[in-house]
Image: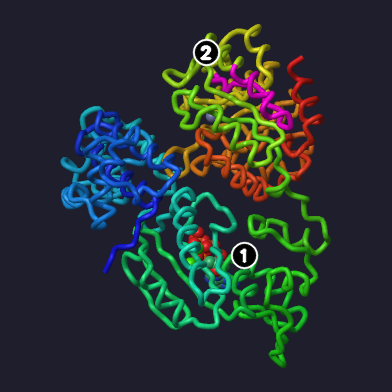
Amino acid sequence: MARRKPTNDEVVRVLRELIEYEKLEEGSAQSFRVRAYEKAVDAVRSLGRDVADLSLEELRAVDGIGDHIARRIRAYVETGRIDRLEELRAKYPPGLLELLKIPGLGPKTVLRLWNELGVATVDDLRRALDEHRVRELPRMSERMEAKLAKAIERLGLHAEEHRFPIGEALPLAEELVAELRGLDAVVEVAYAGSLRRFRDTIGDLDVVVASRDPATVMAAVRELPQVDELLLSGETKTSFVATAGMQVDVRVVEPEQYGAALLYFTGSKAHNIRLRQLAIERSWTLNEYALADADTGEVVASRTEEDIYEALGLSFVLPPLREDRGEIEAALEGTLPEVVTDADVIGDLHVHTTWSGDGRSSLAEILEAAHRRGLRYVAITEHGENLTINGLDRDRVLAEREEIEAFRERYPDMVILHGSELNIGRDGGLDYDDEFLAGFDWCVASVHSHFDLPQAEQTERIVTAMHHPAVNAVGHLTGRLIGTRPGIELDFAAIADAAAATGTALEINGHLSRLDVPADLLWTVRDRDDVLVVIDSDAHHVSDFENLRYGVRVAQRGWVARDRVVNTWPPRRFLAWARRKRR
Ligand code: DGT
Ligand code: CA
Ligand code: CA
Ligand code: ZN
């Protein structure tokens, strides 16, 4: 049987696994080989076509993919395996890859923990820490033990309840949904569960299918290329472990039941319980098949989620709000916040191009993509000079400014701002000097260093930066990388106060590994009309403008009212607001 063509995301996942093993093999996270793989990952991600369609020759010709890696990619496309990866998988226990995710644990230390203490999983490490065995190793200490214990706790890396970062879950879910949508037997299909509610981490994937022919759908699910191990194979439910290690539950219902099933499996459980109580008060029942009369069984509503909310006397609740955090009461009273939707976002104020060392699309490509997306304003914000390697010195800033000027004629209906992503220094200082900073139209300032400062100092440096007239927004506030790096410690209430006092927006960075400011923090200031937010893609490539949609979901989860999102404002209002602070 011909092998199904792996997607680019799948190839990226395999390369990333190889990267982690190579780190162990090299005893370094920075080796030449590791960097070569990382370049290849970037190259595949920005390829713009299916990597599986490229011949070995074509792969070799791709910038960033060398001969070795080209061969490995071809081997994977053709046979579904890479000998080198199999060899490394056999050599190291898989738990070591989890250990590598813990901040403060490099490959060398992980290897030492394994060789000398037999630590092969996060649970093993926790035990070793509890028993104070780690401090006996060279270059380890009591302080280091405490730091590691805290890092494990903050990352939520429990072997028993392993959760996947949304950045891993979403691409897989989209692949599965696209695959199933292509089947004739499928009327409708969507992912539900915590992913649809847009939580940061996902326990398992829940997929709901509407079909009149469940047997055909279930048979097709069993044959999906993403199935690694079949766990359960029933008439209307199939569960499997996907190639990425994530568990997936696929359920099939009749098209008439689709809304009820989607509602049920989207959750949260707490939200469902409240809905069921409301149903019971009316002598109805609510389950994954229908809202129905408790006595006669007659269906009250089931076809769509909207029908069911309406029958229960509630306004429609968007999935990211379904956490029983007051949304039921608000929906009953009709006082749900008017949250931002995809179509409301008409600007993007944090965008990189190849002028930044880590940008992957040219200025021309980025502007064309922004324009095609219908954006009314966009700020090009390359890294400031203090970010080594990737930052721009003054000459390059001015050179780019000239290029941007030329593009303004090409896109008369899109305002192009020339900005910068500044680096907040240890004491709140910024790149360049005040006069030079005044030459930008818009600046985002972000923390890219000193992640370990105590809370008071960390808060203080950011507040200091917010007071600078050049700083319009604070980028990815906590600096967290979901599943890999915990956020910095902050007094968020103080940050929100400073944002309001200085006219500085807080960015919701929509990159899936960041989603920062986190929704939970935003939720704590949901009633503060004076705390403004900007939803940014932080694009480094034309495909990253999709991040705006993810940022919108974070804003919804944080109950951010639309009018608090400055890039929903018409250009004139937005520009007047941004200029006010810079004067
Ligand atoms: P996860 O997978 O841990 O990230 O979180 P969820 O929310 O996706 O939870 P999951 O996969 O256990 O179940 C999916 C949805 O199904 C959940 O959000 C609500 C619904 N559900 C599951 N179990 C129950 C239950 O016992 N009662 C009710 N009312 N709903 C449930
Ligand atoms: Ca789930
Ligand atoms: Ca589930
Ligand atoms: Zn950036």
Q: Is residue 385 left or right of residue 341?
A: left
Q: Hey, what amino acid is under mark 2?
A: Arg
Locate ligand 1 by image quadrant.
bottom right
Furthest toward the bottom, the residue is 296
Examine the structure image and report whether residue 168 is included in the region drawn in magenta. Answer: no
Pinpoint residue 29: horizontal percent, then vertical percent: 29, 32
Q: Which residue is mark 1?
A: 270
Of 138 and 502, which appears nearest the observer? 502
Of 178 and 14, which appears nearest the observer? 178
Say which element carries label 2.
helix
433 is higher (above) or lower (below) than 236? above
Residue 23 is at least partly visible in this image: yes
Q: Residue at x 43, y 54 (%)?
A: 163
Residue 396, numbered circle:
2
579 is higher (above) or lower (below) than 500? above
Pinpoint residue 148: horizontal percent, then vertical percent: 36, 38
Q: Residue at x 60, y 26 (%)?
A: 380
Examine the structure image and report whether residue 414 is included in the region drawn in magenta. Answer: yes
Q: CA distance from mark 1 to mark 2?
A: 53 Å
Pinpoint residue 128: horizontal percent, then vertical percent: 27, 45
Q: Is residue 323 left or right of residue 169?
A: right
Pinpoint residue 265: horizontal percent, then vertical percent: 57, 69
First-in-chain label (1 vs 2):
1
Residue 162, numbered circle:
none
Of 362 and 55, which appears nearest the observer? 55
Q: Hey, what amino acid is under mark 1?
A: Ala
Q: Residue at x 60, y 8 (%)?
A: 433
Of 136 and 190, which appears nearest the observer? 190
Q: What is the magenta range?
A: 403-424
Q: Mark 1 vs mark 2: give the one in front.
A: 2
